[in-house]
Image (cartoon, rainbow, N blue to C red):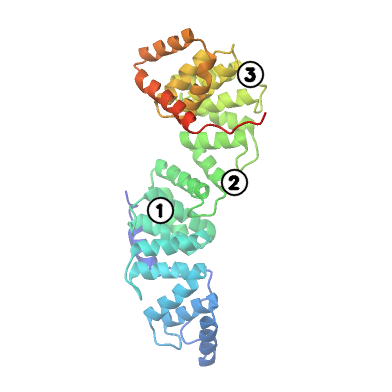
Amino acid sequence: MPLPGVAFYLSLTLCAQAPTNAAPVPSKTLSAEEISDLRARAQAGNAVAQFKLAKSYESGDRLAADDVAAAEWLRKSAEQGNSDAQNELGVMYLSGRGVPRDQKEALFWYHKAAWQGNADAMFNLGAAYYNGDGVNVEDALSYAWFILAQGAGNPKADTAVERADSELKPWAITEAFKDIAALYDQGQYLPENRAESARWWLKAANRGDIDAQVEIGVRMVLGQGIPVDPAQGRYWCEQVAKQRDPRGENCIGYIYRHGAGVKTDLKEARKWYEQSAQQNNVLGIKILAEMDENGEGAKPDRASACLLYARLALAGDRDALERLARLKPQISQKDWQDVRRQLSLMHANLSKLDDQLEERHSDEDRFPGPIQPH
């Protein structure tokens, strides 16, 4: 739901939001000679001069106010990567000044500027997601952009963040933290930054979010974007596993299987993967099959591995099908019949499995491997 009391505030500030990083151009401060020099540099392709000339047209400084000319010079500057021009061009598209009103185009330029860390563009993205300007209203994502704008130095974001802190539901604030983490992960609207992403995942994890606890736990165990911290990673994975979430069980299984901060214990690892597989978790099933095949934590049991791979193959897992096809010749016909019997008790489609294996063998016949030298 929209934040009560914020809409009026945003309506007063959004379109007037000027780049805070650019030097202001007060009316009638430039001489005719300075305007001439500015125009010459702008025509020569100087992006800063193009932006300043656009602002002169916008404000009527020694030039007749002309929003169309302002937009044209803003575009030239924006296309060269000037983030202030990108943000200002977005504002003009949102309001329809000098260009046709186009909310999607406004968002396009805001994102261009935000990628470069432009605080005003981040604020305007927050306002867009709050007001539904070219996007669906999303309170959490709006709040996320306001937080980013605040961190980048936009002074008007302080009020928006303060109000949201007091008016948003706790879960929405947590979602905003996850949104920021995802933005840094994806590298689409912000430069990819795994360390910064981990910082926000940790904030969400501390608020009890299970998805965030999985993310930060795994990253700490593996050292993905942050220093390896197996003990703390294990703590977070245990919080998830306590809720019988297979992602936490897989994480703890990994810790014991690979000796991440603990002594390697394949039997303990197997216990956790078995719990995950009991919940039909694909990763848990696949790793348990590997352990059966290799004899990790128990005697090798290739028939059991075939059964597990077959379950995944029937669900469309091509890698599991390849592993099954490779392993099947290594077990006896009796064991294979027992595998089929167990699959039948699970109401598995045995005809489909036979067709998959046959198709796989046909592909091998059509595309044989290279001839090996003698």
Percent across and percent down for residue 312 are: 44, 24
- Per the image, the residue denoted by label 2 is 195
Q: Residues within 10 Å of mark 2 (few under 14, many from 20)?
A: some
- Horizontal side of 183 relative to 352 (left or right) equals right
> In which quadrant of the rendered view does residue 123 lie?
bottom left
Q: Is residue 302 visible?
A: yes
Q: Residues within 10 Å of mark 3 (few under 14, many from 20)?
A: some
Placement of 319 over or under 225, stated as above or below: above
Q: Secondary structure at mark 1?
A: helix
Q: Secondary structure at mark 2?
A: helix
Is disc 3 in contact with disc 2, using a CB cutoff of under 8 Å? no
* Residue type, mark 1 in image: Ser
- Per the image, the residue denoted by label 3 is 265
- Per the image, the residue denoted by label 1 is 142
- Horizontal side of 341 relative to 201 (left or right) equals left
| Front of the two marks 3 and 2 | 3
